[in-house]
Amino acid sequence: MLGRLNHIAIAVSDLAAATALYRDTLGAEVSEPQPLPEHGVTVVFVVLPNTKVELLEPLGENSPIAAFLERSPAGGIHHICYEVSDILAARDRLKAEGKRVLGDGEPKIGAHGKPVLFLHPKDFNGTLVEIEEA
Amino acid sequence: MLGRLNHIAIAVSDLAAATALYRDTLGAEVSEPQPLPEHGVTVVFVVLPNTKVELLEPLGENSPIAAFLERSPAGGIHHICYEVSDILAARDRLKAEGKRVLGDGEPKIGAHGKPVLFLHPKDFNGTLVEIEEA
């Protein structure tokens, strides 16, 4: 069921500084900042040869990462995203195993234009897991 | 400078349960548990098509992940590991930029038999970063 690691998402309070760190200090390829108001974040993609890191800065009043950054002002890994081939089959299998799917359980269109779901960190070793239909 | 994402390391308190979660519930390929007494952990490798997840359980009295699990008993992402082609050049560049390298600054042989260094989370958006010479 589990496919590629699509990305690691790191919440940051200063996107320009985090971008400079990855671009200038770590020497990675980075994208321009992309505001995603419908997701409450501005994102910069750090392109690695085999996957990507997404640097997320809060955008707007109800950003889903605002509370995370209040608890961890220095930032930190917010979630990891695995690809699945069939998100409804994955959801049903997870629910049948007693794992909690966040929200109303219906896939939303994520930042890459594909259906996504988030899984409860308490059911996944303290890790917020996103699954995305690849 | 930054190469592939070598792995994401997730600290867990119950390696058998975490392995079953990734193998049975998430349907991923997993390795046998590998005790690494010199690193104070037992590790299970979760093999993804493009990278791997390492599930780490404390081993022995002075495990480097024991304090992490005391703070976060449910587990959590402990570090991420990026590959670099020349670890001494990477270290010197990072130090010249004012970034803190943990320990005495000399690469150690990591769990994969290759030289590694760890970088201070406060200098990397609250993320413990390992670099490994690929």
Image (cartoon, coloured by chain):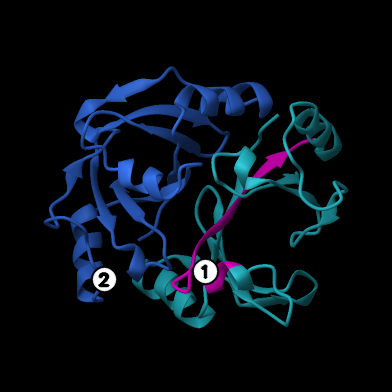
Chain colours: A blue, B cyan
Residue A33 image-quadrant placement: top left
Magenta-span inclusion, residue B82: yes
| Chain designation of label 2 | A
Q: Quadrant of the N terminus of chain A?
A: bottom left
Q: Residue at x 47, y 74 (%)?
A: B73
User: Which is more toward the observer, B72 or B43?
Assistant: B72
| Chain designation of label 1 | B
Task: Please state the horizontal and vertical placement of residue A121, each as a whole percent of the image.
Answer: 35, 63
Amino acid type of the residue tagged 1 in the rendering: Arg
Q: Is residue A65 visible?
A: no
Residue A97 image-quadrant placement: bottom left
Amino acid type of the residue tagged 2 in the rendering: Lys
Residue A113 in the image: above or below residue A105: above
For disc 1, the neighbor class at 10 Å (few under 14, some 14 to 19, many from 20) is few
Q: Residue at x 24, y 28 (%)?
A: A60
**Res. A99 mark:** 2
Front tag of 2 and 1: 1
Task: Please state the horizontal and vertical placement of residue B124, each as a whole percent of the image.
Answer: 60, 39
Task: Please state the horizontal and vertical placement of residue B88, each as a whole percent of the image.
Answer: 86, 37
Magenta-span inclusion, residue B57: no
User: Which is more toward the observer, A76 or A130?
Assistant: A76
Q: Residue at x 79, y 33 (%)?
A: B95
For disc 2, the neighbor class at 10 Å (few under 14, some 14 to 19, many from 20) is some
**Res. A127 mark:** none
In the image, the segment drawn in magenta is B68-85
Q: Which residue is mark 1?
A: B71
Residue B109 in the image: above or below residue A59: below
Q: Secondary structure at mark 2?
A: loop
